[in-house]
């Protein structure tokens, strides 16, 4: 599967496709939340503490997940000229709670620009996330999104160019 197609998958599927997590001692959803929470907080200790409310995890485990994730998909923090950004939000459920993981990936550079976890999804959350993404862009790039109305409304409100693509992978057979 080409790099471009890889980013047309949902966040959960991206992490699965990258084959970051080999063992299953900790539920997959908790690991995805762990990566997103670490990217948001930049603290292994804080991430482990937050995740421990869902499932017992050590700081060492969190550090190992982050290291493996960044080997497969670099996380950038500098402002660059960008042309095409795949934007997605997916729900991750753990302990009967829903968490919404938003992500933005520079398709040409194969870099994760931003990943955030929220407790709800709507126009305001999407608009806030987009504004954060734009802080890493020297220009106004074109966004690739699925048909989530909250994302489309936020893009329109910020006068950003976008195109619709379905992010779901087709099942064989």
Image (cartoon, rainbow, N blue to C red):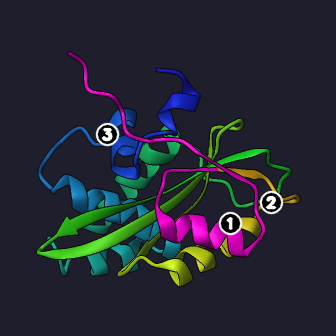
The residue identified by callout 1 is 133
Residue 159 in the magenta stretch? The answer is yes
Disc 2 element: loop
Using the rendered view, name the quadrant where residue 136 is placed: bottom right
On residue 16, the disc is 3
Residue at the spot 41% in from the left edge and 76% down from the top edge: 121
On residue 24, the disc is none
Q: Please determine whether, in this image, residue 33 is positioned above or below residue 87.
A: below
Q: Quadrant of the C terminus?
A: top left
Q: Is residue 42 visible?
A: no
Residue at the spot 36% in from the left edge and 33% down from the top edge: 169
Disc 3 element: helix
Residue at the spot 12% in from the left edge and 74% down from the top edge: 95
The residue identified by callout 2 is 137
| Residues in magenta, as a range | 144-173
Q: Position of residue 133 (x, y in %)?
A: 68, 66
Report whether 167 appears left or right of 151: left
Residue at the spot 53% in from the left edge and 79% down from the top edge: 123
Residue 139 in the magenta stretch? The answer is no
Circle 3 residues within 10 Å: few <14, some 14–19, many ≥20:
some
Which of these two is toward me, 148 or 137? Answer: 148
Tell me the CA gap for discs 3 and 2. 27 Å
Q: Position of residue 8 (x, y in %)?
A: 49, 39
Circle 2 residues within 10 Å: few <14, some 14–19, many ≥20:
some
Cβ atoms under marks 1 and 2 closer than 8 Å: yes
Q: Mark 3 or mark 2: name the one nearer the start of the chain.
A: 3
Circle 1 residues within 10 Å: few <14, some 14–19, many ≥20:
some
Which of these two is toward me, 52 or 122? Answer: 122
Q: Please determine whether, in this image, residue 57 is positioned above or below residue 28.
A: below
Q: Please determine whether, in this image, residue 50 is positioned above or below residue 16.
A: below
Using the rendered view, name the quadrant where residue 117 is placed: bottom left
């Amino acid at each position: 599967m080409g790099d471009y197609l890889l980013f047309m998958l949902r966040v959960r599927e991206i992490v699965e496709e990258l084959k970051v997590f080999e063992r299953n001692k900790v539920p997959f959803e908790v690991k995805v939340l762990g990566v997103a929470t670490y990217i948001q907080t930049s603290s292994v200790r804080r991430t482990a503490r937050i995740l421990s409310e869902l499932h017992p995890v050590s700081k060492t485990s969190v550090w190992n997940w982050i290291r493996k994730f960044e080997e497969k998909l670099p996380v950038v923090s500098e402002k660059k000229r960008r042309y095409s950004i795949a934007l997605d939000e997916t729900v991750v459920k753990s302990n009967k709670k829903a968490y919404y993981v938003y992500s933005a990936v520079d398709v040409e550079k194969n870099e994760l620009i931003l990943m955030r976890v929220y407790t709800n999804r709507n126009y305001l959350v999407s608009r806030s996330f987009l504004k954060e993404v734009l802080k890493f862009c020297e220009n106004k790039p074109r966004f690739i999104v699925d048909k989530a109305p909250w994302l489309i409304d936020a893009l329109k409100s910020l006068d950003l160019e976008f195109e619709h693509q379905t992010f779901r992978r087709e099942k064989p057979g």
